Image (cartoon, rainbow, N blue to C red):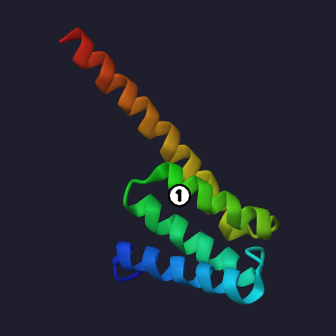
Amino acid sequence: LKLQCYVQAIEHCDKVLNIADFLHNNLRHPLCAKAYMRRGAAYRALGEFERAVGDLAAALDIEPDNKEVQAAHTKAVRDLEEHRKQKQVRKALKAAG
C-alpha cells in the first residue's frame, strides 16, 4: 500500500484470505482482520468505497476493539456517503441539462 500498488495489494490480500480459509477453515483469524483491513484500504484508494466498507466491516467484526480499523471504517463510510451524494448531483445535473 505504501508503494501505491493497490491492485497488487488486493491480490495479495485475496491470497491470504484464500490460504486462511483453506488451512484454518476460519476467516475470523486475526491474520484475516489485517488482510481485510489492508484490502479495504486499497479499495478505498481506488475509489471502490462499497468494497472498502465491506472489508473494513469484516475486519471490525473480527477485531471490534481495534481503533485503527474503527477509524478506517468510519472514513470509508464517509467516503461512500460523499460518493453517493456526488453521484446524485451528477445525475440531477444531467437530467436538468
Q: Where's the N terminus, which quadrant?
A: bottom left
Q: Residue furthest bottom?
A: 23
Q: Left or right? Give the position of 8 relative to 25.
A: left
Q: Left or right? Give the position of 12 relative to 17.
A: left
Image quadrant where residue 70 sits: bottom right
Nearer to me, 8 or 3 = 8
Query: Which percent across, then down, holds residue 74?
Result: 63, 52
Q: How many marks?
A: 1
Neighbour tally class for label 1: few under 14, some 14-19, many 20 plus, Cα within 10 Å: many
Q: Residue at left 48%, top 51%?
A: 49
Q: Residue at left 45%, top 34%?
A: 84
Look at the picture and state if 91 lies above or below 16.
Answer: above
Query: Which percent across, then down, holds residue 83?
Result: 42, 39
Query: Which percent across, then down, holds residue 71?
Result: 64, 60
Q: Is residue 67 visible?
A: yes
Q: Residue furthest top?
A: 96
Look at the picture and state if 81 lies above or below 36.
Answer: above
Mark 1: amino acid:
Ala
Query: Which percent across, then down, holds residue 5?
Result: 34, 78
Tell me the residue that label 1 is attached to.
Answer: 52
Q: Residue furthest left?
A: 97
Element at label 1: helix
Q: Residue at left 53%, top 83%?
A: 15
Q: Left or right? Give the position of 66 relative to 84.
A: right
